[in-house]
Structures are given as C-alpha cells and as structure tokens.
Amino acid sequence: MSTFETDKAGLLWNGTAIPNAFICEYMPAAPESHVKVYLYGLMLAHAGVAEDTTMLDDVAKALGLERAAVEAAFRYWERCRLIERIKDRPPVYRYLSVQQAMFQKQQIPRDEAYENFALAIYGAFGERRKLHGGETVLAYEWVEQLKLPAEVVMMLIQHMIATRGVQFSFKEAQKLATEMSEEKIRSIEDAEEFFGRSEAVRKGTRKVLSHMGKRRNPTKDESNLYIKWTSQWSFTPEGIEIACEQMTKGDPSFAYLDKILEGIASRSSGKKMTGTNVEKQLTGEKDETARMREMLVAVGIKKPVLNEGMRLIYRNMLKDAEHDVILLAAHEVGKRSGTHSLDDVPTLLESWRERGLTDANSVSDYLGHLAQQNKRLKELFSIVGKECGCNQQNRERLSKWQEQWRMPEELLEQAAEYSRNVDYPMPYMDKLITSWHDAGIATLEGAMEDRKRFTASQEHKQQTSPSGEKKVIEQKYEQRTYDPDEFSGLSPDQLKELSKYDA
C-alpha cells in the first residue's frame, strides 16, 4: 500500500502536469496508443494509486486497448528512459523525470545492439530527415517484441522510404511490421517476397480505385479482397482491371467488384484469369446473351429475363446442335398455340436428331417440305369441306400418294371430291386412292370410269337386295372407326416425337 494516497473521488478534478519536453521530444514519434498509456499512467502516478494485481487490465479497459498493447507501451517508455519497472508481481512502474532523462542520456549504460541499429537507421535517412529518438526506439521494438530480425526491419524502413517517401509515418510502418510478424517473416528472402507481394497489392488496389474514380489509399479490407482475387481466384491485375468495366450499375466499390469477379471465376472452368481470358469470357457471355434472347423471342417469350437455368438449358442444347438449328426449333415451337415453353425446344431438337437432321440446311429443307405438304393438305380438305388435319399421319398418306405412287394431283383432288359426305375423309381417300393404285388407274378419266362402274354395281345391289335398304354410295367403301382426336393436331405429349408434331 502507498504511504500517501489521494481521494479517488477528486481524481477527475485534479490536474496532471506534462513537461513540454515530453510534448516536443517524445510524443511526436510515439504511437498514439503509447501516448495514451503514458498519460493515463502519469495521472495514476500523481494520484498515488496503490499496488493492484489488475492494474494493467484496468488501464487497458479504461483506454479501450488490449492488455498486450498496454504492456508494449510501457516497454516502449522504459526504453525511452521515461519510466522504469521496479516490481513484477504485481507490476509497479515508476515515472522518471523527463528533464533528468534527457540530461542523463550520455550516462546511461550503452546498449551496443540498439546503438548499432539506430546508426543503421540514421544512415538510411542521411540528411533527408531528422529522426526523433522515440522513432528509433519504436523501430527497435519490432526487433525485440515482434521478433523481426534487425536486417528485416531495415528492409522494412527502406521499403517505406521507397514507396511512401522519406517522411513516412513510423506508425504506418508499425502496422506493416505487425503484419510481417504475424506471417513469421524471419529472413531476407522472406522479406523480399513479402514486400514484392505487398507492393503488387498496393499498385493493384490503387489502379482499381482509379477505375472507380476514387483518389485515395486502399483500406485494409480492400487490400485483403485484392489478395483473395489474385491468390485464391487466380486473377491477374489485367484481368481485374478488365472486370472493372462490368460495374455499370450504382456506385462502384470493391464489394461490387468482388461479386462480379466471383461470378467470372465460377464460370471460368478453373482457367487462369488473365486479361485475355477474362475479355474472351466476357465477350463470349455477351454473345451468348444476345443469342439466347433471340431464341427466347422466337419461342414467343416477350421481354425475356435470363437466368442461370435458361443458360444451362441453352448450353446443353449447344452440345448437340448449332445455334441456327436451335433457332429454327424455337420458331417452330413458337408457332404452336397456347403456352410457349423453352423446354419444348430441346425435345424437338432430339426428334430431329433421330431423323438425322443435324444442320440448318437439312432442317430448313425438311421444314420447307412439311410446309408444302400442309399447304396441299389444306387444299384437299378445302375440297372435302372440312378443317385441315395437318398431322404427321396425314402427311405420311400424302407422301405415299405423291412420292411413292406418283399419283397425279388431279386424281387426289377427285378423291377429295368423292369424300365430301364421309365422316372420316382421309381414311376414305386413302382407301379410294389405294384401290386406284392397285388397279393401275393413273388418269382422271380412268378414275371417273371406275367410279361409274362402282356406282352402277352398288345401285344394282340395292335393287336386288331383299331388304331394299339404300345406302349412300360412299358408305360402300369399307371404313374403320377412327378417333377424331387422331386428326386434331398435336398435344404436348406428342411433341417428343417429330412424327406427331403439328407443323
């Protein structure tokens, strides 16, 4: 316990004298936290605070510092000869006279290691800057407390002079020294690698800030992001600068750029993100977006909003078909009535592949042929007097009549005329034309003569029939019962097979 004590209640209202020599000679070079600890301790010393095992913790709490920072500050002022530690458990410090400390500098026992270190630092600055004693003491703290070799600290100082100028702040240098200590820099080689990396990050982040139109030094968080981009995501500085051009919305920032780079990296397939590769990838994605929009508009999706799901569907289609073929399929799907779905496009492409249609020319020829068949079917159904059944089954019938049997078009029209009163005209026409083909009838006259013979035969049968029942002539041709839905065009399930696709 102290011999004399001061009432703690009056502590806030008392004054603490600070020598001007401290303000002029020691305070400018000392870290801010060290100055706070010195002044707070000086106040407690004047107040006569009793010994306390929690003293260092109390000081740290009062100043908002870590205990280690408080201990480092007291060690700093010990080296400056402004305080001395007179007891360890609990720690007790004595504040020395600033004036006496300055007068007795020459009488203090020599610390050759420190003196050689200080001389080396003075030599690095020469006549360009006059150092305060506290600055060399702080630098020596990096050797003793941060465990950095003296030659590494000298490299740090030379690095600061080269990058920040001769008037750099030792407080800023201490931040770098702490970082080096945390990375366990213990040799010249380690330091060279560290400074090379540090300089690259500094230049890179400043360039990024320049792209954003910001003229300031990067923050620690921004530097950490830059390190992540280059070390973890394999971006080169040129690749990062090209990606900066993608910040087109809102206020550009490192966080904004981080999201852009994350997306580019995730789509890069593990490639190194050089400037050339990034530019190539972004150009490719821009072209892909334009092609996808073209496809979606063809499908019938107005003002399409692209998402990764759509991109995946499109990229999968590109594995088996060119864009021009995909676009043709999209147009065909878009012709359908009702809801237009992008999922129908790969289904149609698959059916084309099964038919050997893999390029735009073959697909275009095929679609042109379908269009011609549908047009002819509509003409025949117009003669019949019913709506056209432009489905694959009817197209196959037409193909048989025209391409296999080479039946004259006038015979097809005549068969349509004979089918006017039939419930299911296409099966009836097929039966009629088949009978002509089997009989070798290939002219209109022959077909009409065959019709007369058939009509006369049917009339004779009616006259000799015991029941006297009369039937329409067309009903004499054998007919099957067909489901009308068979001729009503496509259903969604029929799209899978091109043979059931309603063109």
Image (cartoon, rainbow, N blue to C red):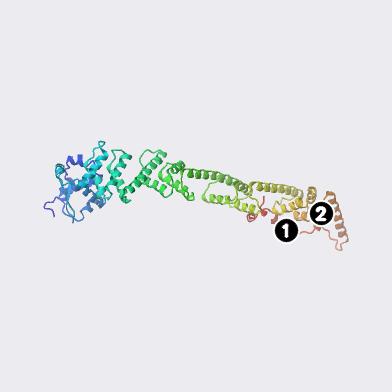
Does residue 144 appear to the left or right of 372 in the view shown? Answer: left
Residue 140 lies left or right of residue 453; in this view the side is left
Q: Residue at x 77, y 48 (%)?
A: 383
Toward the top, the furthest residue is 127
**Mark 1 Cα shell of 10 Å, populated few (<14), some (14-19), many (≥20):** few
Residue shown at the point (26%, 39%) measured from the top left: 125
Residue situated in front as seen by the camera: 279 or 66: 279
**Does residue 172 show up?**
no
Count of numbered tags:
2
**The one of 44 and 268 positioned closer to us in this rendering:** 268
Q: In the image, is 471 to the left or to the right of 20?
A: right
Percent of width and height locating residue 156: 30, 44
The picture places residue 430, in percent across and down from the top left corner, at 77, 55
Classify mark 2: residues with Cα within 10 Å, few (<14), some (14-19) or many (20+). Answer: some
Which is more foreground, mark 1 or mark 2?
2
Q: Which mark is residue 378?
A: none
The residue sitting at 38% across, 44% down in the picture is: 201
* Camera sees residue 124: yes
Q: Which residue is mark 2?
A: 436
Quarter of the N terminus within the rendering: bottom left
**Amino acid of disc 1:** Tyr
Amino acid carrying label 2: it is Trp
Left or right of 469 on screen, residue 372: left
Report the Cα–Cα distance between label 1 and label 2.
23 Å
Mark nearer the N terminus (1 vs 2): 2
* Residue at the (82%, 51%) spot, across then down: 442
Q: Position of residue 134 (x, y in %)?
A: 22, 43
| Mark 1 vs 2: CB contact within 8 A | no
Element under label 2? Answer: helix
Whole-percent x and y of residue 482? 72, 58
Q: Which mark is residue 482?
A: 1
Q: Residue furthest bottom?
A: 466
